[in-house]
Structures are given as structure tokens and as C-alpha cells.
Amino acid sequence: MHANKRILVTGGAGFLGSHLCDRLLARGDEVLCADNFFTGSRRNIEHLIGHKRFELMRHDVTFPLYVEVDEIYNLACPASPVHYQHDPVATTKVSVHGAINMLGLAKRVKAKILQASTSEVYGDPSVHPQTEDYWGNVNPIGIRSCYDEGKRCAETLFFDYWRQHKLRIKVMRIFNTYGPRMHPNDGRVVSNFIVQALRGEDITIYGEGRQTRSFCYVDDLLDGMVRLMETGDDVTGPVNIGNPNEFTIRQLAERVIALTGSSSKLVFQPLPSDDPRQRQPDITLAGQLLDWKPTIELDEGLRHTIAYFDKLLSENAA
Ligand code: NAD
Ligand code: UDP
Ligand code: UDP
């Protein structure tokens, strides 16, 4: 039987955070969602308002937070390049000051704490696919650095609180994830392509579209996240969670056009600087530690996501 817990989800009004809140509430837990609504939206969680085990708190994690909880999922951080580059100094602060505050909270209340880290800690990787023992290839002074280095420093803080203060930590390296509730204007490739295809606009491929990503559907990702939190205290991670099926960006565009039946054309725009050329998770460790692997193929996940955006765009047009 699952013992009900009090769980803090930072960034709980965002794409991944709101699905996590749903899942924890369905399991019987009490959920405290803390979000400053920078990239998250009330719409993602409005179906939970009034739920007797759900509490929403407008809070910026760069400021201290005093609450009593058993577990913390630390997801607060803008995740798309367009959003995290909007105020890069704030982005580093969210990762670094946010981690310090949440680790300080975990230390005081003896909570278990999970960090939503990222495949971006590997930068433009020279090891392919990426294993957890690869240290990465990150530019410390480029336009992506506020995110990449912020997340790397957060990992450092997690491991120092673990070594120094014996905290129970879980570090999860999340690879590109997509699904319903992605922000339609956040500039990420899956949301951009679907919205463009549904509107009959040109599909914007950056560079020649030969760079690769491996796309994980949100339900699979959340399953891995919750399993990681449930592991014994000896498991700290970092653990890669993502779908190892790798596609070029051009292939993704073609799948989206096929599945939407759109007449959109491909257009090619300049590749942003420091854009990683390839990315694919090695998920052997997740298999061993969590008995986890993704089960949802790209086409199936895209169909669910397209249905979501189709509804959203028609509601917005009405
Ligand atoms: P998202 O932008 O939808 O969600 C982030 C949430 O954090 C938003 O609700 C936002 O309002 C909130 N937030 C931002 N700054 C905050 C602050 N200072 N205080 C409180 N809340 C704040 O993005 P997402 O895709 O749901 O990502 C969630 C987490 O997972 C992030 O930490 C991200 O770095 C990580 N991640 C996501 C992916 C992915 O592909 N989706 C990949 C790697 C890592
Ligand atoms: N903190 C918090 N909530 C708590 C306890 C601590 O937000 O319940 C913050 C507080 O701002 C502090 C930070 O976490 O600065 C780090 O806490 P820690 O105890 O590690 O360090 P110290 O208080 O000594 O700076
Ligand atoms: N991309 C693209 N067109 C877009 C948005 C993104 O070609 O409209 C490319 C982008 O240059 C990158 C890949 O798609 O190579 C994934 O971009 P995203 O921002 O989704 O994620 P990240 O680069 O952080 O993995």
C-alpha cells in the first residue's frame, strides 16, 4: 500500500510539473505546487484548483520557502531556449539559488529531494549516445550557458549537500520531452512544428535539419521520474531518462506534416550558436536501477500532442 505523503512540486504549473501533480494526486498524495508562472500557466492546473489535497502557491524559488513536506521535486526553471535566454541572469539564479533554497529546505525537514537536471549538462557531446559518466562539452560563456551551467552547478550543489549533509538526493537528467501542455510559443521544436503545421505556416528548420534529438513522450518520462524518487537512499543518480529513438530535425518535421496532413512547406533558417549536433540517451542505468524504459513511439506521442494543440488553437480562435 502506498503511504500518502506531503510533496512539494516546484515549477508545478509548467508542462512536466502539472502532469506530475496529476499523477501524485491520483496516487493519494498531498501536493503543494509552487510556481511563479514565468513559463507555467494556470490553465495547466486549473482542473486541480479546489481539489482537497492540492494547494497552489505563487512563489519564486530564488527566495527561501518554509513549508513542511516529505518529498521535493525541484522542477522550477524555464526550459526552452527562447524562455531561458529572455533573462539569462534570472535563469542562472533559478537553477543555483533555487537549488540552494530547496536543498536548505530538504535539510531542515529531512525531505527526499529530486532535481530535474537535463541532457544539456552534456553540451554538444563528443560521446554518443550519452552515458552518465560522460562529463560533457559545455561552452561556459555562450548563449546557452545560463541554462547548461546553471543546471550543472545545481547538480554540484545536490552532490555536496549529499556528501556534506547526508541529504537523500535524486538527480535525473531529462532528455527532450514533449506532450500536451507544452507552451505553444516556447520555441521548442515539437511545439513549434505542430503549431506551424496546424496553422498551415512554414515549418522553420534551423540549419539543414541534420542535427538529431531523441524525443520522449511525457507519460514515459513521468513514469521514470516517479520511479527514481521511489528508489532506496543509496540511489542518487545522475540517471538519464529519455527515449533513445533518435531522429534528425528534418525527419521530425516530415512526421509532423504527415500526421497533421498539413500543406506547410519546410523553410531553412540559421542554426543558433552552440546548438548541439546530436543527442541520444544511453538508458542502460535507468533499466538497471528503475526497471524502466519508454513505451510510447514518436508517432503515437505526436498524435496525442497534435490533438492537444488542435483543441487549444481552436479554443483560442473562438
Ligand atoms: P516549463 O517551462 O513548462 O516549466 C517550468 C516551470 O517552472 C514553469 O511553470 C515556470 O513558471 C516555473 N518557474 C520558472 N522559474 C521559476 C521560479 N523562479 N520560481 C518558481 N517557479 C518557476 O518547462 P518543463 O518542460 O515542464 O520543464 C520542467 C523542468 O524539467 C525544468 O527544470 C527543465 O529544466 C527540466 N527539463 C525539461 C526538459 C524537457 O524536454 N521538457 C528537458 C530537460 C530538463
Ligand atoms: N531555506 C529555505 N527553507 C528552509 C530552510 C532553508 O528556503 O526551510 C533556504 C535558506 O534561504 C538558506 C538556504 O536554504 O539560505 C540554504 O540553507 P542551509 O541550511 O543549507 O544553509 P544556511 O541557512 O546556513 O545558509
Ligand atoms: N529547432 C528547429 N526549428 C524550430 C525550433 C527548434 O529546427 O522551430 C531545432 C533546434 O535548433 C535544435 C532542435 O530543433 O537543434 C531542438 O530544439 P529545442 O529548442 O526543442 O531543444 P534543445 O535544443 O534544447 O534540445
Image (cartoon, rainbow, N blue to C red):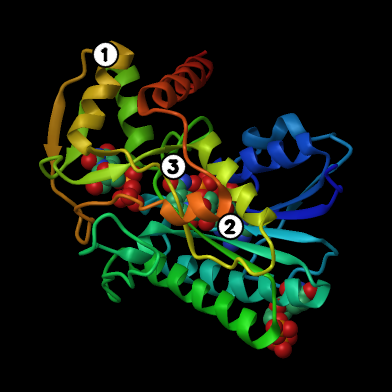
The disc, 3 or 2, on the residue closer to the chain's N-terminal end is: 2
Q: State whether residue 261 is above or below residue 116.
A: above
Q: Which residue is mark 3?
A: 177
Element marked by disc 2: loop
The disc, 2 or 1, on the residue closer to the chain's N-terminal end is: 2
Q: Disc 2 and disc 1: Cα gap in Å? A: 35 Å
Of 250 and 128, the residue lying toward us: 128
Q: State whether residue 129 is above or below residue 135.
A: above
Q: Crowding near pointer 3: few (<14 within 10 Å), some, many (20+)?
A: many
Q: Which residue is mark 2?
A: 76
Q: Which mark is residue 262?
A: 1
Q: Is mark 3 within 8 Å of ligand 1?
A: yes
Tags 3 and 1 in contact by the CB under 8 Å rule?
Answer: no
- Residue 226 placement (x, y as % from top left): 64, 48
Furthest toward the right, the residue is 52
**Residue 37 visible, this orientation:** no
- Residue 295 placement (x, y as % from top left): 47, 31
- What amino acid does circle 2 point to? Ala
Tags 3 and 2 in contact by the CB under 8 Å rule?
Answer: no
Q: Residue at x 28, y 44 (%)?
A: 213
- What amino acid does circle 1 point to? Ser
